[in-house]
Amino acid sequence: MVSQRINSRADSSEPEAGRVALRAANAIPEERILDAAYQLLLTIGMQRITMADIARRAGVSRATLYRRWGGVREVLGTLTTRVWTELAESAFPSADAAGAAPAPQAAHGRAHVVDGVARLVAAIRVHPLLRKIIELDPDFLTPYLLKRRGANTNHQLAMLEAGLQAGIADGSIRPGDPALLARAVLLTAWSFTLTGPVFVDAPEGTGEAVGRLDDELRLLLDRYLAPEAPSASCAPSAPQAPSAPLTEGGTEQ
């Protein structure tokens, strides 16, 4: 009887032990690994990072990394998505967030979009992650500029579309296709983020000249999205004073 109970416990514990081991491997927080990759990127740049470096810094095995990502580039893609998503959500505060007060621009969709884009551009432009990529690994950006959209781009487009739809609904943004408008707005934002500092001779993305450029970005977006004013040819004419009746000789009385 004793041996049967022991064998029974041993038999039942084997699959449980496997499940515990599996849970232990999966329980390592992704944030811990991405934080390690972030510190390495700031220290040595993308090109020199290896999976062994990330595993060592995070205190995990390389096998753990390869169960989640195919290589360094995938890890860094997840990292950049995390950073840009956090910045986007900070730039466009949600009125529906638990415990959060409604955004002050919520009643004016155009102001919400314009202010959010300007905040996002300013935040990404000076973020240490982007500065290090531009300094050491600018080629990392090329596929996302010339070949395909990344997850972060799609996330930003979705946020913009939602804001634009709200602005169209409240009348502060001109009628149009929100998806198309979002793409035009995001393309403009990218140019001010990546190329803007070069045009005002501020390679670090800071300074008075950059601030003035951001003011122009706000003005550009505000006028682009504003409802169209009636043209002069379509505006109603001012009422005319009635003409005096003419006499038979053709002169006014």
Image (tube, rainbow, N blue to C red):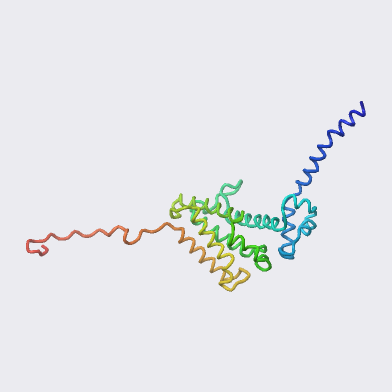
Q: Position of residue 169 (x, y in %)?
A: 46, 49
Q: Residue furthest bottom?
A: 201
Q: Residue furthest front?
A: 147
Q: Is residue 162 above or below residue 235?
A: above
Q: Is residue 138 above or below residue 81?
A: below
Q: Position of residue 43 (x, y in %)?
A: 74, 65
- Choose between 133 and 29: the one closer to the eye: 133
Q: Is residue 135 left or right of residue 5?
A: left
Which quadrant of the structure image shows residue 245? bottom left
Q: Position of residue 18 (x, y in %)?
A: 81, 40
Q: Residue furthest right?
A: 2
Which quadrant of the structure image shows residue 76? bottom right
- Choose between 193 and 109: the one closer to the eye: 193
Locate the C terminus by quadrant. bottom left
Q: Residue furthest left?
A: 248
Q: Is residue 157 left or right of residue 56?
A: left
Q: How many marks?
A: 0
Give the residue displayed 63% in from the left and 63% down from the top.
141
Locate the N terminus by quadrant. top right
Q: Position of residue 152 (x, y in %)?
A: 61, 55
